[in-house]
Amino acid sequence: MATVLTWMVIATAFSFSVAAPEEALISRIAFGSCANQTSPQPIWDAIVNFKPQVFIWLGDNIYGDIRRPFKLFGNERTIGPWKNVPRFVPSSVDEMQEKYKIAKKNHGYSRLREIAKVIGTWDDHDYGLNDAGKEFKGKDTNQKLMLDFLDEPHDSPRRKQAGVYASYTFGPEGRQIKVILLDTRYHRDPLRSDGTILGTAQWKWLEKELNDQPSAITIIGSSIQVVSNLSACTGPLFYMESWGRFPSDRKHLFNMISDSKRDGVVFISGDVHFGEITRFDCGTTYPLYDITSSGLTQAVEKVIPSFLHFGLRFLAWVTPTTMRVINNNCKYKSCTYGQPNFGVIQVDWEAKPVSLRFEVRGVSGEVVNSVTTSLPDLKTKTKKTQLPQQHCNLEVDLPWLTRHRLAILFSFFVTVLIVVQVGGLYVVISLMVKCLRKCKLD
């Protein structure tokens, strides 16, 4: 607790930015998302054992909304073409407070708060409603509850602004790490609109932050993925939220980073219930990495029987992707990880040149995916360098057959299944007819 109090005393805020004391050199940062407060959370032990100096929440810090069960028939139908009630509904203020209380009292999380500075943003489920944007009426009340959960000072400017975006600066001059946390909910236009994610005021704030004092490393935290746009390849089967579904805003973000000439920009994200590392080589003059960690409790492989995990991993492998980093440091061939996980950024300031290691780690702290780079590799170049085209082409620009490979395979599988069932039914009926004819003749 002493560490937490020390951070609170030394932190100073401005619009909303926080500078850490010069002597606090930061070399270990952990982050995560998607933590259901009612689920077991053994992963905190691995996070505490990593001994992060900073921990960053990337949203769905609690699951505050209420999820109704799948119902195809009955008075309240939550799925199907005759759906008549929403699958998710908001909780009351009292229910939200109770859920935050449960999350904050978790023993593992309490241990983390004693050793690390905890900061964060939100996503839809702690914002108050699944996939919600600026239209959600409970956002102002829930903003207060979320900031209470993070122990935000009562006089913080963050409590007076529209949205929970913030920035922090840690470390001594020349070795500073700046963390910019975006709010992708409060001002977000409806999905499929190609409108804005951040809103005018937040865009102006972000431009100011990017053009402010330089830092060796700048981490931009987004609750949804920035680089990857898997929905371009998984639709029409299913869609995930990402910056890629707002192409104009994503292009604007990359241009703003490029125009700022800011070195060492790295994205971290959550939301999708699996971990991966992606990169985009044509947004600036150096690669833009996005380390996705999701989730601390919620993960795609947890919702299906273990004997189906291989099939899910196969589907992840065959799903087209132009941005995912595929290397020999991955536990699975797809270089995705569908079990509970957390993300890590380690900086070796003593290495020459300074090295950065991005990792996704499992519930026992094991590394399941990693990428190592260096600060010179993340510096703005005076001339545009010819970077590998593998990470330049957007998913939406893939050939039609490649882009819709998953849907084609699914359709083929369903067709084969129907043919087999119809064929089997035909064989059974034919045998029954033959049997009846034989019995009649007898």
Image (tube, grey):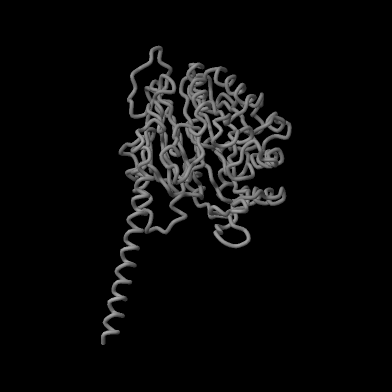
Q: Is residue 281 above or below residue 57?
A: above
- In the picture, measured across the screen, residue 241 lies left or right of residue 422, that is right
Say whether residue 29 is visible: no
The quadrant of the rendering that contains the N terminus is: top right
Q: Is residue 388 above or below residue 293?
A: above
Q: Position of residue 305 (x, y in %)?
A: 42, 59
Q: Position of residue 59 (x, y in %)?
A: 57, 40
Query: What is the quadrant of residue 330 in the picture?
Result: top left
- Residue drawn at (58%, 34%) of the image: 184
- Residues 336 and 67: in front is 67
**Residue furthest out toward the front:** 441
The quadrant of the rendering that contains the C terminus is: bottom left
- Residues 295 and 24: in front is 295
- Residue drawn at (71%, 41%) of the image: 141
Q: Position of residue 133 (x, y in %)?
A: 62, 37
- Residue drawn at (50%, 25%) of the image: 218
Say whether residue 277 is visible: yes
